[in-house]
Image (cartoon, rainbow, N blue to C red):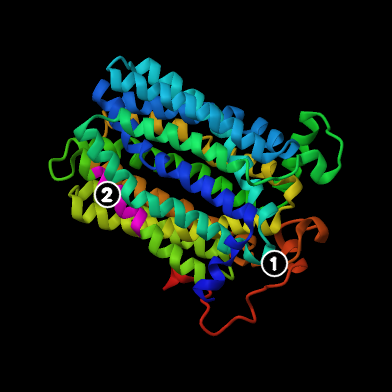
Amino acid sequence: MKVQASLGVLSDRRFAWYFTARTVSTAGSVMVPVALAFAVLHIDQSATALAQVLGVRTLTMVVFLLVGGVIADRFSRIVVLQVSHVLTCLTQALAAYLIISGDATLTQLTVLEGVNGAVSAFTMPAMMGIVPLVVDRSRLQQANALLSFSRSGLSIIGPAVAGLLVVGVGPGWALAVDALTYAVAIVCLTRVGLPRRSQEEGRAHHSMVRELREGWSEFTRREWLWVIVLAFGLTNAIHAGVLGVLGPLIASSTASIGEAGWGLVLSAEAIGTVLMTLVMLRLQLRRPLRAGMLAICVLAVPMVLLGVAPAIVPVAIGFFLAGAAVEVFGVGWSTALHEHVPVSVLSRVSSYDALGSFVAIPIGTFLYGWLATTVDTEVLMLVSAGVYVVISLSALLSRSVRELGRTSVDPAVAGSAGGAEARDATRDVTGAAAGAEADEPSRS
């Protein structure tokens, strides 16, 4: 696939404006993990404090995810996204003010991030359901790759800039930039112009309980979906604890990394993602989940390096490889959802996906905050990396995960029932595209 064809998806005005909104908001958001982590550590230099803030944010998100999925399927997803962006803008602006003024407390940041977590429970399902409405089905992988390219491209400089801001003027300014970008994104979203949900489908609204049951039915009938979510429910807990809690703590206590160095390490991860995105724009994943789960095992590399060689060069290399691996899975997973789940229930299904994937993250953050004080760091990192790989590979024991292919058939028309039925009902649209196109770049 030529680059020009890969970028052709931007010719759709609605997707172009949506892409712009996502890019603008991401420009500020990529600085937040670094800024927030060190804002907390400046108040309380402990893994427990950081685990508290991150854990509460994820916990509130998990609590509201299912409601967010129903709301996004019921109303205009653009309106849901705009309202969510308004609330995120306000909370980030308040957090920035408190940090810059020097009045921020651990309790205040915990509450504000808790609110942000609740808001993101509405943002994520809405975003997942928008892409199939503004992009031709034949261009879904390219659209997802471009969105990822935007995010990861900005992530190259964002964490590094945030690290410099933390050292130079303090972490609050990075949060202020994030608030401003959400305000701009709200304006861009007004140009997307999706109809209201009721106008799109002409269906009457049922009770929230009934709509949740419909979403659950669509989620559980696809074995490949719930198997992957189950695996990520466990691995995300490890990832959040090791790289979200222990990572910044190790960086701040290691002279060769430091706060600015941690920003550079995260930028290296983004570089890996960007380079892999260029590959994903040109190549089709014929078995997206098989390639994704093999690739995701690479995330164990930075975990090992942080434990045995906490120096900026090896750790940055590890994060670079991890970034490339995450991109393979991320694009493959989004494309699988967009191609195999009817758009009418996509937000609800994605909310169950997010719920299952994120529900154990608060446990992971709190657990690793405690383990950091009781277990040797090197041992903890090595054991965590090993468990991460075993869980990831175990998902491939499911045939539906290994063999799920690409499809040009609308699942709402085909009546896809997931698992073996989905495989039999769909055709592999990349089968005739042999030649230069790769089957599984993660095996190379």
User: Which quarter of the rendered picture does the N terminus lie within?
Assistant: bottom right
Above or below, 439 relative to 29 = below
- Disc 2, SS: helix
Above or below, 249 relative to 403 = above
Circle 2 is placed at which residue position? 265
- Disc 1, SS: loop
Query: Which image quarter: residue 54?
Result: top left
Residue 85 position in % (x across, y down): 54, 33
270 magenta-colored: yes
Circle 1 is placed at which residue position? 407
The part of the chain drawn in magenta is 262-271
Question: Hey, what amino acid is under mark 1?
Answer: Thr
Residue 426 position in % (x across, y down): 74, 68
Q: Name the one closer to the observer, 365 or 184.
A: 184
Residue 373 position in % (x across, y down): 26, 28
Total residue callouts: 2
115 magenta-colored: no
Instruction: Give how far apart the Cα atoms at labels 2 and 1 are.
Output: 37 Å
Pointers 2 and 1 in contact (C-beta within 8 Å)? no
Query: Which image quarter: residue 40?
Result: top left
Q: Name the one closer to the observer, 24 or 241.
A: 24
Q: Residue at x 29, y 37 (%)?
A: 246
First in sequence: mark 2 or mark 1?
Answer: 2
Q: Residue at x 60, y 42 (%)?
A: 189
Query: Which image quarter: residue 423?
Result: bottom right
Q: Main secondary structure of the magenta part?
A: helix
Packing grade of label 2 (10 A; few <14, some 14-19, many >=20) is many
Residue 318 falls left or right of residue 241: left
Q: Residue at x 63, y 48 (%)?
A: 226
Residue 51 falls left or right of residue 355: left
